[in-house]
């Protein structure tokens, strides 16, 4: 589809596509501003929507904004423009994380199915089947991460068990850390002035046999909340990693993460994000050491993949609430 002029409905559609991105505790930590003279969308961090306890460095915020940037790029290409993206474009404005200019001539096109997938992508915390993922799909997911400057490692059973063990340790800490538990409840339970909460079906499912460390979100588990069948015996886990660990690497990781999730969605594969261990510096360092190879990378996200029920969409802020307006 080709749009020669950018009208208000199309701009709103672009922003609506961007904000379908995932974010830790559904904080949606982004602000958008459109500059018509240069036809550029500026993406800033919404500092009031950060997680002071779970994400003191802002790494998860950068990943979330990176996911939104990738969605915006996909939507811009879908409507016929070339998305010219710059990360951290103005050193004097540290809250400005990215800009996306709509160039007149599209040199590239959005891969088939990604635009449709961004509207359907959602986290599924339900049990998956034990059906293995095809090797050619795993290759496509790895290529999706590589395109954005990251790499995706498929974990064997030994490394997957270590990741699960470390994530269990992190989840245990999160449940007993008063500040983090309070922060999580504020953003996920709602209603609060800043938070939209999460759907009850997202808050409810837990692993009856404690095979997989699903995030509790501060909800008291009861037999009624447990799934009718156990989670998969050996979850398919992949880790997203980068060679460096700078702010630009976090933003690139977010774009790589979202591209991986969209490719998975386009192929009917469900996903859930296991970020708990990455919220503790010592546990993240432990993962880096145990997953280390010749590339000596930094772990940015753990992703669980599989076939199973579709997750429920988390509520999103209205486009007008996510925008700072249009400036000349």
Image: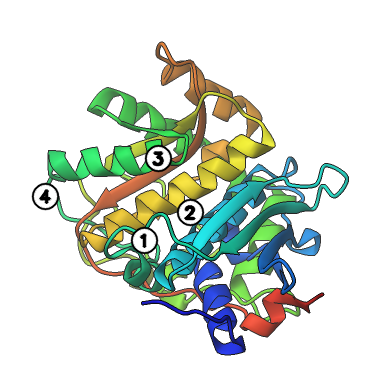
Taking 296 as reference, is 113 above or below it? below
Let me know if residue 235 appears in the view.
no
Q: Position of residue 223 (x, y in %)?
A: 35, 67
The residue under label 3 is 147
Q: Position of residue 243 (x, y in %)?
A: 52, 23
Answer left or right for 110 relative to 16: left
Distance from the alpha carbon under mark 1 to that under mark 2: 9 Å
Foreground residue among 65 and 52: 65
Q: Secondary structure at mark 4?
A: loop
Distance from the alpha carbon under mark 3 to that under mark 2: 30 Å
Callout 1 touching callout 2 (CB < 8 Å)? yes
Q: Nearer the viewer, mark 4 or mark 2?
A: 4
CA neighbours of label 3 inside 10 A, class few (<14), some (14 to 19), many (20+): few
Residue at 66% x, 31% y: name it.
246
CA neighbours of label 2 inside 10 A, class few (<14), some (14 to 19), many (20+): many
Label ID, residue 125: 1
The residue under label 4 is 131
Q: Secondary structure at mark 2?
A: loop
The residue under label 2 is 215
Residue at 55% x, 60% y: name it.
68
């Amino acid at each position: 589809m080709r749009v020669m002029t950018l009208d208000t409905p199309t701009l709103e559609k672009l922003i609506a596509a961007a904000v379908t991105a995932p974010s830790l505790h559904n904080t949606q930590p982004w602000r958008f501003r459109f500059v018509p003279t240069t036809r550029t969308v500026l993406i800033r961090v919404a500092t009031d929507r950060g997680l002071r306890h779970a994400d003191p460095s802002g790494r998860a915020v950068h990943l979330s904004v990176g996911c939104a940037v990738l969605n915006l790029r996909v939507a811009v290409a879908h409507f016929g423009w070339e998305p010219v993206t710059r990360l951290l474009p103005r050193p004097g404005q540290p809250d400005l994380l990215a800009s996306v200019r709509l160039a007149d001539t599209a040199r590239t096109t959005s891969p088939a199915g990604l635009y449709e997938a961004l509207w359907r992508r959602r986290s599924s915390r339900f049990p998956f089947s034990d059906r293995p993922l095809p090797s050619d799909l795993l290759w496509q997911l790895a290529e999706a991460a590589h395109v954005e400057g990251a790499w995706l490692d498929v974990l064997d059973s030994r490394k997957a068990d270590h990741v699960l063990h470390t994530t269990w340790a992190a989840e245990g800490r999160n449940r007993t850390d008063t500040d983090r538990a309070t922060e999580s409840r504020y953003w996920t339970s709602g209603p609060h002035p800043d938070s939209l909460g999460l759907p009850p079906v997202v808050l409810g499912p837990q692993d009856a046999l404690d095979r997989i460390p699903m995030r509790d979100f501060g909800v008291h588990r009861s037999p009624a909340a447990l799934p009718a069948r156990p989670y998969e015996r050996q979850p398919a886990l992949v880790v997203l990693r980068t060679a460096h660990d700078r702010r630009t690497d976090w933003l690139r990781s977010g774009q790589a993460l979202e591209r991986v999730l969209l490719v998975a969605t386009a192929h009917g594969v469900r996903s859930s994000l296991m970020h708990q261990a990455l919220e503790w510096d010592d546990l993240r360092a432990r993962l880096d050491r145990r997953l280390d190879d010749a590339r000596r990378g930094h772990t940015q996200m753990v992703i669980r993949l599989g076939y199973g029920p579709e997750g429920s969409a988390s509520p999103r802020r209205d486009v007008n609430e996510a925008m700072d307006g249009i400036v000349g």
